[in-house]
Amino acid sequence: MRVLGLDYGDVRIGVAISDSLGWTAQGLTTISRNNPIDLTESIAKIADIVAEYRVQTIVLGLPKNMDNSEGASCEKVRKFKVKLEKALHGIKVILFDERLTTVMTERLFSDTNMAISKRRKHVDKVSAVLILQGYLDKEYNQNKKNNTLSSDKENEMDLENTNNFDENDDLGLDEDEMDVETIVMTDEDGNEVEYVIIDEFIHGDVNYLVMVRAENADDDEAESVIFKQVEASDDEFIYEEIDEDEYNNLEPVLKARLAEFDIDVQ
């Protein structure tokens, strides 16, 4: 029976799966949340994966602050855990401290030549791998401690050392097969413009997209634009570019989110 790892986000859920022995984690997929409010579709996709791989345990990353406190993100994850348990009867859902996951993910990506526009699409899946691998390592070490006479050094497990992740391990990423996440916007004149999505997030109950034009996607100095969702229906999402005042209000949030990707929001 395999273990499933999830990195929950406002707009994407990274998914990782263990091997049949429960020793190693591998990136499986990323679930895009087309509706940032409704989780029904996302949970249905997770249920399909659980059935396909005969999963009995789900490990869900808990994004605590570095001082071990919990903020709004943790509250969202805990609510998601409740919904998962209700939908997936008999499946154990375990919360796992993911404080160092973001740092480790960025460390992995910083050693690659992957374009910034592609990183955002795959960072969630890699984070799910690190969450799951950390859990598997902790379980292995705990079982080892229970079955052998361990030393004091083995008993004092440091948080960082629980993630014994080899940077050369298979993350389930093939750069030749990586597709960037794009969207086509229609402007006021009826012209279609294709953008590459750099980041998506919800702030103050508003859904925002940070993007660059598709033709400039591989240029690290390309100017980014920010749109907010102003209307949504079953078959259409309407976005408009934010004004200077709104950007000024969002600037601290944007810089905090995008600094890890060395993106300068203009």
Image: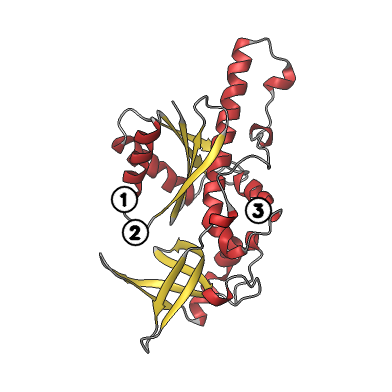
- What's the residue at 37%, 87% (across, down)? 188
Q: Which residue is mark 1?
A: 41
Q: Amino acid at mark 2?
A: Asn
Residue 126: percent from the left, percent from the top? Answer: 56, 47
Where is 165 relative to 184, above or below?
Answer: above
Along the viewing direction, whichever of 185 and 224 lies nearer the viewer: 185
- Compute the Cα span from label 2 to label 1: 9 Å
Q: Secondary structure at mark 1?
A: helix
Where is 2 relative to 192, above or below?
Answer: above
Q: Which residue is mark 2?
A: 35
- Compute the Cα span from label 1 to label 3: 29 Å
- What's the residue at 56%, 29% (across, down)? 136
Q: Is residue 213 among what the camera can see?
A: no
Q: Are marks 2 and 1 in contact (CB under 8 Å)?
A: yes
Residue 109, numbered circle: 3
Mark 2, other Cα within 10 Å: few <14 / some 14–19 / many ≥20: some
Residue 20: percent from the left, percent from the top? Answer: 49, 27
Pointer 2 or 1: first along the chain: 2
- What's the residue at 34%, 59% (across, down)? 35
